């Protein structure tokens, strides 16, 4: 590690900007999850449709797999901690971190950097089974059976579908801005 006194302003700026950007993405996912959500009256444990998933997709498509994974995992896990879903926070951290990473990895494949609409749609769709699998296994362990978690799948599919429908047009518009190209 470099001595902080030997850092030049130009060498510390990218690291500082990267930290600020990642923190802002985490905050955006958290706020979109907290303020823009609807509880679904399905299954015993219900379900939640929120725009945090759209923000996870947007962050991953615009900034790549690492920032997408961090934004999704921390943003939604913090939501779980502050909104009464505390038990789910570690599982959300894993599920949404993997989902954000998968979306970013595919969207940024082949040097596309999230600029291919088709690749972005594919990335979001491919990420869904990863998220579903993590939540399914966690619910199976928590509930002590492997049938109860199936009731959460429709709500999770709706949530991801809404996320895709919101994220793709937003990314398409933002990619026209020089900063995001």
Image (spheres, rainbow, N blue to C red):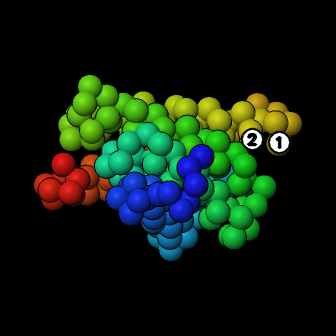
Q: At 78% from the left edge and 55% from the top edge, which residue is drawn?
A: 87
The mark tally for this picture is: 2
Q: Which residue is mark 1?
A: 143
Q: Position of residue 5 (x, y in %)?
A: 53, 62
What secondary structure is marked by label 1? helix
Q: Which mark is residue 120?
A: none
Q: Position of residue 10 (x, y in %)?
A: 35, 58
Q: Position of residue 91 (x, y in %)?
A: 70, 45
Q: At 26% from the left edge and 25% from the top edge, which residue is drawn?
A: 110
- Are discs 1 and 2 less than 8 Å apart at CB? yes
Q: Is residue 55 visible?
A: no
Left or right of residue 4, residue 113 in this image: left
Q: Which residue is mark 2?
A: 139
Return the residue found at the far front.
6
Return the residue found at the far bottom.
35
- Which one is nearer the viewer's eye here, 50 or 19? 19
Q: Is residue 83 above or below residue 104?
A: below
Q: At 72% from the left edge and 33% from the top edge, which residue is drawn?
A: 137
- Which one is nearer the viewer's eye here, 64 or 152? 64
């Amino acid at each position: 590690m470099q001595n902080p006194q030997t850092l030049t302003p130009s060498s510390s700026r990218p690291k500082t900007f990267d930290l600020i950007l990642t923190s802002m993405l985490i905050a955006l996912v958290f706020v979109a999850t907290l303020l823009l959500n609807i509880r679904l009256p399905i299954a015993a444990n219900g379900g939640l449709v929120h725009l945090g998933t759209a923000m996870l997709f947007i962050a991953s498509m615009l900034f790549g797999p690492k920032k997408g994974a961090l934004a999704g995992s921390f943003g939604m896990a913090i939501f779980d901690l502050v909104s009464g879903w505390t038990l789910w926070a570690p599982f959300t951290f894993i599920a949404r971190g993997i989902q954000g990473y998968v979306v970013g990895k595919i969207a940024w494949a082949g040097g596309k950097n999230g600029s291919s609409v088709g690749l972005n749609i594919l990335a979001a769709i491919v990420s869904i089974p990863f998220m579903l699998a993590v939540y399914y296994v966690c619910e199976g362990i928590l509930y002590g059976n492997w049938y109860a978690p199936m009731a959460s799948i429709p709500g999770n599919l709706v949530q991801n579908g809404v996320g895709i429908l919101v994220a793709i047009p937003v990314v398409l518009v933002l990619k026209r801005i020089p900063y995001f190209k």
